[in-house]
Image (tube, rainbow, N blue to C red):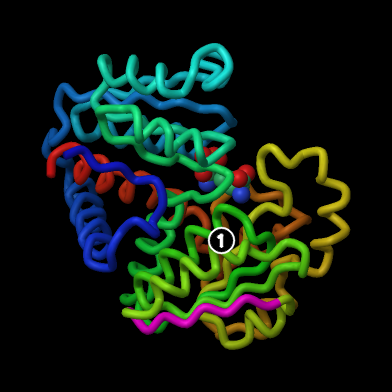
Amino acid sequence: MKRDLLTLADQGPEALGDLLALARALKAEHAAGGIPPLLAGRTLGMIFQKPSLRTRVSFEMAMRHLGGHALYLSPDEIRLGERESVPDVARVLSRYVDAIMARVFAHDHVVALAQWASVPVINGLSDYSHPCQALADLLTIQEKLGTLSGVRLAYVGDGNNVLTSLLFGAALTGMALTAATPPDYAPSPEVVSRAKALAGPTGASLQIGTDPAEAVAGAQVVYTDTWTSMGQEAEAAVRRDAFADFQVNEALLAGASVDVGVMHCLPAHRGEEITDAVVDGPHSWLFDQAENRLHAQKAVLVDLLTR
Ligand code: CP
Ligand code: NVA
């Protein structure tokens, strides 16, 4: 039966560990001069309702490195659910391509695509979650620190799709995640209880608070994301005020571990959620993290299309 990747919460700890191991192996093979064409002749259809640099290019290059092909479908082209219903798009595309990656506004759309497509569907970011990002993030932390279990990760900023996937990923890998968000921008109770349920068997610790300094104290990794996600542009001014005290800057990092690593899914809004000095400074893992989208997604593609 075909499988999909809609949220990390659908994975078990073992399946997630296997995906990360596959990503590490594919990355090593790539560095050693090339990976076998595991997806020769296979095609990925990529539906975008929102802009993208990393997701678009890393999926396209992942397919190319694996001997396959990716097809970019722009927001204006398909107009998912407007020009054509989601079930019809899913059924038609399934006749042409071997897998679908979709970046959507409503998470329900990626769920409906998966329900109606006869090929695997990958969530390339929805308003609910960003599982491919979290996979790359876990791969990065594992590479930098040698482990995930027990790692102290602080998230400062919006309780958005990126935090949701980090909570699920941290829960499944036994990390200690402390988030600080403004009170009105906390992750939803549904997300928190789903993540806590996943954390039971792994011993992960998940805490949601409102004090950035408290969250960052002693952290090995500090993570942030934009204050205004795609689709929330009308709220930008209100959000700038609400998040003013939630900037990742050198003063905040002074309270973290001395060799703290800083992460951001990018794009960064320099001077808002993160400063130039931090993005470009010695603690920045941002560009290694961006690179790892390529390797993590290769693992997802190989897993969904060959196993
Ligand atoms: N981090 C991320 O998903 O980047 P893009 O929006 O550029 O794809
Ligand atoms: N939270 C951001 C992530 C961008 C990669 C957004 O949804 O716009």
**Splitting the image into 4 quarters, where does residue 14 fall?**
bottom left
The spot of residue 257 in percent (x, y) is: 56, 85
Q: Main secondary structure of the magenta part?
A: strand
Q: Can you say whether 283 is above or below 42 in the image?
A: below
Q: Position of residue 77 (x, y in %)?
A: 52, 13
Give, as a single range, the part of the protein colored magenta. 202-209
- Using a 10 Å C-alpha cutoff, classify the residue at mark 1 as few (fewer than 14 neighbours), some (14 to 19) or many (20 or more): many
Identify which residue, 93 or 246, lies in the foreground.
93
Q: Is residue 89 magenta?
A: no
Task: Specify the quadrant of the image occupied by residue 264.
Answer: bottom right
Q: Position of residue 291 (x, y in %)?
A: 41, 49
Q: Residue drawn 30% across and 42% down? A: 4
Judging depth in this view, the residue of 235 and 200 nearest the camera is: 200
Residue assigned mark 1 = 163
- The answer to whether residue 299 is left or right of residue 270 is left
User: Which quadrant is the C terminus positioned in?
Assistant: top left
Judged from the image, the secondary structure of the residue bearing numbered disc 1 is helix
Which amino acid is tagged 1? Leu
Residue pictured at 55% horizontal, 12% vertical = 83
Of 293 and 19, the residue lying toward us: 19
